Amino acid sequence: MADGLRDAIVTGRLAEGDRLPATRLLAGELGVSRGVVVQAYQRLADEGLTGARTGSGTVVTGHGTALGHRAAGDRRRTLAELRLPLSVSDGIDLDLSPGVPDLSAFPRTAWLRAERAVLDRVTGADLGYGDPGGTPRLRAELVGWLARTRGIRAEADDVVICGGVAQGLALLAHVLGKNDVGVEDPGSRGAWDQMSYWGLRPVGVPVDDDGMRIDELAATGVDTALLTPAHQFPTGVVLSPERRRALLTWAAAPGRLVVEDDYDAEHRYDRAPVAALQGSAPDRVAYLGSVSKSLAPGMRVGWLIAPRRMQAALLAAKHASDLGNPALPQLVLAELIASGDYERHLRVVRARQRRRRDALLAGLREHLPQARVTGVAAGLHLLVLLPGEGEDVLLAEKVSAFGVQSHPLSWHRQRPGPNGLVLGYAAHAPDRLAEAARRIGRALNPRERSQNRSVAPSS
């Protein structure tokens, strides 16, 4: 009852000065005891929304209407001002936005088994205020796992567990201060926006078929560079051996740092994964990773392994930020890694994602033969390059009219360049991806579109 009355006040159906019914009368109308109404009125009075006035009974005294509407409106405006969409557009039934993993593949049974094992032996000390860098067991398991799979060189104390790569970037930004940072162009729009928010200034550095142009990076005069060297986002190219050597030579100068975002290291299909940069120069590379693409973004578990000279400042920033990540998810993830369940889950997911990639790729080759598709050997997305320049936002709008959501390549670049669509394939079954390719072909091929104007997208 209190909730209903509160809602009426907040939404303006009850205005300041309106009198509420007498408790006995309202109890009779609602068929409840008078005590229930008295308790509801008292709760509203405690919240400052109502009060008793001599001769008038209980009246509305709070200002919930203006506050409630303003808060909701501000939030909607804030979301609308973000540069990338947070939700799927109306009429979309095939969302191919990049960065969305297969959430249906989350290993619920293995997670529950690991959680029970953890709860059977967790101690009070495990649940207290611990090291802001993370639980010792997860950090130890991670350095072993990353050494085996990514060639990382680190000890457990070098790891800072954080709320995904996003928080890792925020911690680095705090330590680096308001500096310019060289970023890949095209590159991750989300990472650019993150850095800009925290006071760093992204400076675009061109990317070609060998990855970031290190000569162009050197020409910018920056001391920090952010890269995705193992699988560049969004082009999918791998930083070539020559560029890797050039980058590490550039980073050897005093005060320089390479930030390595290893965002989808677990998803490799047609080639062995290239080792992480960090293993070649742990004193010059800050390494970022997370479980967002391997388990789920909502877990908000990631890791930052930075040069030791930065460790004290990063731990202080992490402690001031949140005192450390929740302990139980860390312990459960450590159990999954130690038991082998994490690796078994990744093998299953890799096989599923390869089938999905193959279905989308085959469909694009059939229905969009004029396109060049890159980034197919790894990751959870493809880049479809199309003839022309400067029109890919319009192309994405044409595709969305057929029920398929994509990212225009221009969203992720600072300089003019070729038209392209970035298509994520992780969240849909092969038959749905084949259907998405068919619709994209209908949207972008004038002959097919003219033959199918009256045909609505299938559900």
Image: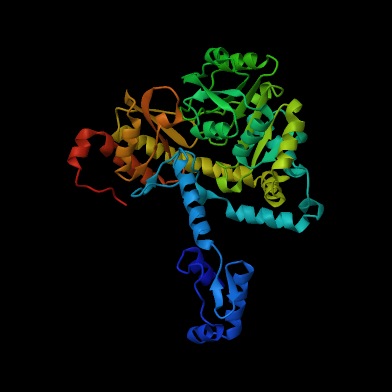
Specify whether 321 is left or right of 372. right
Q: Is residue 26 above or below residue 224?
A: below
Relative vertical location of residue 286 with respect to residue 346 in this rendering, above or below:
above
What colouring method underlies this structural image?
A: rainbow
Q: How many marks?
A: 0
Q: Is residue 59 left or right of residue 94?
A: right
Determine the image quadrant of residue 136: top right
Q: Quadrant of residue 61?
A: bottom right
Residue depicted at 56% across the width and 83% down the height: 23
Viewer can see residue 34: yes
In the rendering, at what x and y percent does residue 182 appear?
Answer: 56, 22
Q: Quadrant of residue 147?
A: top right
Q: Nearer the viewer, residue 170 or 338?
A: 170
Q: Closer to the camera, 7 or 364?
A: 7
| Residue in the picture at 39% in, 22% down | 416
- Residue 409, horizontal then vertical, whole percent: 41, 30
Q: Position of residue 453 (x, y in %)?
A: 20, 43
Q: Which of 202 and 431 lies nearest the eye of the viewer?
A: 202
- Residue 296 in view: no
Q: Position of residue 165 (x, y in %)?
A: 60, 37
Q: In this image, 369 relative to 272: left or right?
A: left
**Is 332 rendered above or below residue 158?**
below
Residue depicted at 32% across the width and 46% down the height: 403
Given the current orientation, which residue lies at the most extreme front position? Answer: 55
At horizontal 71% and vertical 37% (from top left) the residue drawn is 317
Instruction: Left or right? Give the position of 199 relative to 362.
Output: right
Q: Specify the quadrant that holds the N terminus.
A: bottom right
